[in-house]
Amino acid sequence: MKWVDAVIQGLLLGGLYAQYAIGMSLMFGVMRIVNIAHGDLVVLLALIGISLAAAFGLGPGFIMVILIPVGALIGWGLQRGILNHLVGNDPLPSLIATFGLSLALQNLMLTIWQADTRSLDAGPLAIQSVSLAGIQVGVLPLGILAVAALLTWGMHVVLKTTRFGRALRASAADRDAATLSGIDTKVVYAKATAVAVAILGIAAVFQAARTTVSPADGGAQLIYAFEAVIIGGMGSIWGAFAGGLILGVAQVVGSRIDPGWGILIGHLVFLLVLAWRPQGIMSRR
Amino acid sequence: MSASALLTARSLCAGYGDFQALFSIDFDIHPGEVVALIGANGAGKSTLLKTFVGLVTIRDGALDFCGIDVSKTPAHVLVSRGLAMVPEGRRLFRSMTVEDNLRVAADHAGEPAAGSSPWTLQRLYDLFPILAERRAQAVENLSGGQQQMVAIGRALMTQPKLLLCDEISLGLAPKVIAEIYDMLPVIRQAGTAILLVEQDVSLASRNSDRVYCMLEGRITLTGKSSEVTREEITQAYFGVKHEVG
C-alpha cells in the first residue's frame, strides 16, 4: 500500500514538473533553443508574485492572473531582445547567452530579495485533502496535476490545429522555407517564447504555494524540465507531460526506498530512458 | 524602367559577406511570360533568385516588383505581394504532413493576382492528384517527384504573380520531370509568370519564351528561346575565353 501511495504522490509531484516541462518542450523540443535561464524565470516570477501578495494582500488566484501577462512580456522581450539573434542550427550560442542570463538573474534576485526562502499562502487549499481509494491526496497537488494536463492538452491542440501552431512548427523545421511561405519567423518565435514563459507564470504560483522559493533554486527546476522533455521526446508536448510524471514517480519512489536517494533515482531513471530509447518515449521515430 | 514589367533588376549587385556573387545584373520579366535562366554550377543562378526574393542582401543597383522598389523589403512581405519561390532542394517542412505543408503557405498568402481565380487546396489536388491521396502523410515519406509537387504546390498556395523555380528537375527521373513540366502551362494560364532556373539547356529552352544565360555572376546572353542558337548558348554558358584550341 505504501508503494501505491508513493506512486500517487509521485504523479502529483510530476504534475508540477510537467508544468515546467511544457514551456521547455516548446522552446527546446520545438524551437531547439536551449534556455538555461528557464528555472530562474520560474523563481523570478514566483518572487514577484510573493512580493505582490505581501504588498497588496492579494490571493494566489489573483497573483496568477497578474503573472501570466508579466511572464508573456518577459518571454517576448527575451526572444526579441536576445534569442532571435542567436537562432540557428547551432544550439551553442543560445546556451551561452542564457547561461549568462541565468547568472545575472540569480544575482539580481539575491540583491533584491536576499537568500531567504519564501512561499505563497494558498490559504485552506494548501492543507485540504481528499481520500482516494484509501489514500490521502492533497487538493493543491491534485489541482496542479489537473492544470498541467489542461495546459498540455491546450498546447498540443494549438500546435496541431491552429495557424500559429503550424507557423511555429514550420519555422522550427526550416526557417528560410518558412520565410518563403510568408511567415515572419521573428514574430512567431517571440510569440512562442511569450507563451512558454507565461505558462511559467502559472507554474511559479503553484511552486510557491506548494513549497518554498529562493533565488538559487532555478538550477534544479531547469534540470527536471530538460529531463522531462528528453524522456518524453523532442517536439511532443504530451511526451513532456509524461516525462514530468515519470520523473516525479521515480523521485518519490526513490525517496521511499531511502530518503537520500529520491533525486538520484530520478536522474538514474532519466539515464536509463536515454540509454534504452534515446529519441524519447513518445517520439514516432 | 518598363512600367508593365512584373520584376525589374537594373545593375543589381549582391553577395555573401565579403564575397560578391552578382555583378551588375539587368533583368526583366513580364506578366504571363515564362523565362529561363541557365548557366553552369556556381554561375550565380540561385543567388540571383534568392536576391529577388529577399534572402540575399542587395549591395547596389535597383530591384522593382510591380513597379515598387523592393530592395529593402523583407522576404516574408514580398511573398504576400505575390513573389514566390520553389527553393533549390525543395526545403519542405519535415515531420509535417503534405496538407500541413500546403496550409502553412495558404495561411500567409496575399491577394490573388487580378483577374485570376485563387489557388485552393482542392484546385491543387486536382492538379496533383497523387498529393490528395497522400495528404495526411509526413512529407519525408514521399518520393522525390511527389516532394517536388508539394514544393510547387506550397509556393502556389501563396497566390503568386511570379513563381521562381530553382532547379525543379534536380534528382528526378526523366519521366517525372516531364510530368512536372507538363504542369507549367496550367500554372501559366492561371495568370502566374514563371522564372525557370535549370542546368539542362534544352529542357529550359523548350519550356520558355525567353532565356537568360549566366556565367560567373554576370548575364552573358539574353534572347528569345526560339531564336537563340546553339553556338551562342555554348559561348555564353562556358565563356568564350574558356575555348580550347
Image (spheres, rainbow, N blue to C red):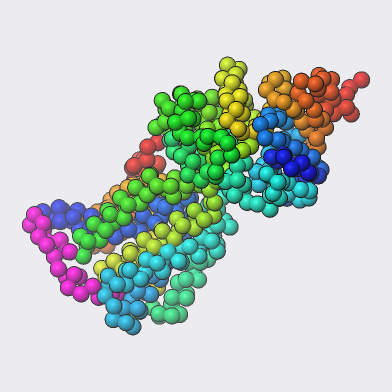
Q: Quadrant of the N terminus of chain B?
A: top right
Magenta stretch contains residue B84: no
Q: Tell which residue pokes out farthest to the bottom in this image.
A: A55
Locate residue B2, reporting x and y percent: 77, 41
Q: What are the residue bounds of the magenta stretch?
A: A117-139
Q: Nearer the viewer, residue B79 or A74?
A: B79
Q: Is residue B203 above or below residue A95?
A: above
Q: Is residue B186 above or below residue A93?
A: above
Q: Nearer the viewer, residue B149 or B245?
A: B149
Q: Is residue A236 above or below residue A144?
A: above
- Asked whether residue B91 appears in the rendered view, the answer is no
* Quarter of the image where one finds residue A24: bottom left
Q: Is residue A126 left or right of residue A58?
A: left
* Quarter of the image where one finds residue B91: top right
Q: Name the residue: 44% across, 50% down.
A: A164
- Asked whether residue B167 appears in the rendered view, the answer is yes
Q: Name the residue: 56% across, 35% down.
A: B116
Q: Tell which residue pokes out farthest to the right in this image.
A: B245
- How many marks on residues? 0
Magenta stretch contains residue A136: yes
Q: Name the residue: 50% across, 65% down.
A: A77
Locate residue B58, reporting x and y percent: 73, 49
